[in-house]
Amino acid sequence: MQRRSLSILCLLGAMFSAHAAPAAEAAKLRVTLLSGLNHHPWQQTTPAIVAALEASGRFTVTEVIPPSPADQAASTAFHIDLSKTDVVVNNWTDYPVKLPAGQTGVFPWMDEVLRFVRSGGGFVGIHAASFERHPEFLRLAGLHWRSAKAGDRIALDDAGKIVRTPKDEGPATGHGHKFEWKVTTRQPQHPIMAGLPAEWLHVQDELWHATRGPAEQMEILATALSPVTKANEPMLWTVSFGQGRVFMTMLGHDGLAMSCLGFRTVLARGTEWAATGKVTLPVPADFPRDKPVTVPTAPNRP
Ligand SMILES: [Zn+2]
């Protein structure tokens, strides 16, 4: 009898958790994280991205490692199933890969990602991550690390007005030494930025200047003052790409940069917004203001 009661209890428990678990999981947004190839230390940053997203309680993260474009056969055969994905977070770039002469670096799986976003999916791009050779990537990203001939440059004047420099004029993208720098909120009403301080101090990171691209259907959410160009350079922005929402952050060079509570908060809120168009994640009470606030980083990948 005792054994039977126990069995019934176990059965009830199993039924309860079988029903409870999917309900809890269903409330979570499904992230596909592209990783495994980057000239930046993805072994540091991928665990930090996973930790930041999962700590928010809002996401489940599935990591996908596309092949190196140097392997044309594997890259051509590779497909990515995004039917159960709400938002793609990109920490992958083919930038450092040298291809044999005549070999393309554009593959069907990249088109699948772009099609997903164009049809209403979310996309988050982090720092150097990009589909470097894909002709539509710059339209999706708005701006990225490119030469001056690749597209316009966008900066904000001190009044917050957009200053557009045509392609072929002005500097190419670059950065100076890493240092602690101030992030300035430019769209305090945007869901990602609502409740964030007007300015906060970010941990030591690269500050990119003169990013280039078509910069179409783009909204600049935050800038930072570059000591190289003396201009307010775009750091966080959104892009409309078809029916989809794109959130881009130029913050996040390495594991140290991603230990910043400001970065982690903005990444999670930006990912939620890209997936849903809304932000429910709160701004932590200890969000940085006049000094950086860091949290312990996740262990590096081997
Ligand atoms: Zn970098």
Image (tube, rainbow, N blue to C red):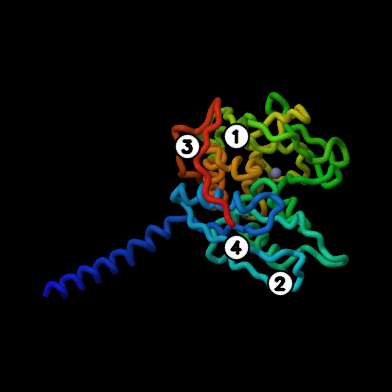
Residue 283's disc number:
3
Q: Nearer the observer, disc 4 or disc 1? A: 1
**Residue 139: where, in percent of width, then height?**
73, 51
**Mark sitting on residue 74:** 2
Q: Are marks 4 and 2 in contact (CB under 8 Å)?
A: no
Q: Residue at x 50, y 42 (%)?
A: 296
SS state under label 2? helix
- In the figure, residue 81 lies in which quadrant? bottom right
The Cα atoms of the two marked residues, 1 and 3, are separated by: 18 Å
Image coords of residue 161 (percent x, y): 71, 29
Q: Amino acid at mark 2?
A: Ala
Residue 121 visible within the image:
no
- Could you tell me the amino acid type at mark 4? Val
Q: Residue 289: horizontal and vertical position, in percent?
A: 53, 28
Say few, some or many: other residues with alpha carbon within 10 Å of mark 4 (under 14 / 14 to 19 / 20 or more): some
| Residue name at image x 61 percent, y 40 percent | 257
Alpha carbon separation for disc pair 2 and 1: 39 Å
Looking at the picture, does residue 143 appear above or below residue 207? below
Badge 3 or badge 4: first in the primary sequence: 4
Crowding near pointer 2: few (<14 within 10 Å), some, many (20+)?
Answer: some
Amino acid on which disc 1 is placed:
Val
Tally the marks. Answer: 4
Amino acid type at circle 3 is Val
> Which circle, 3 or 2, is nearer the viewer?
2
Describe the element under mark 4 as helix, strand or loop: strand
> Residue at horizontal 76%, vertical 41%?
211
Note whether ligand 1 is within 8 Å of mark 4: no
- How packed mark 1 is, by other alpha carbons closer than 10 Å (few <14, some 14-19, many 20 or more), is many
Distance (Cα) linking label 3 and label 2: 42 Å
Q: Which mark is residue 64?
A: 4
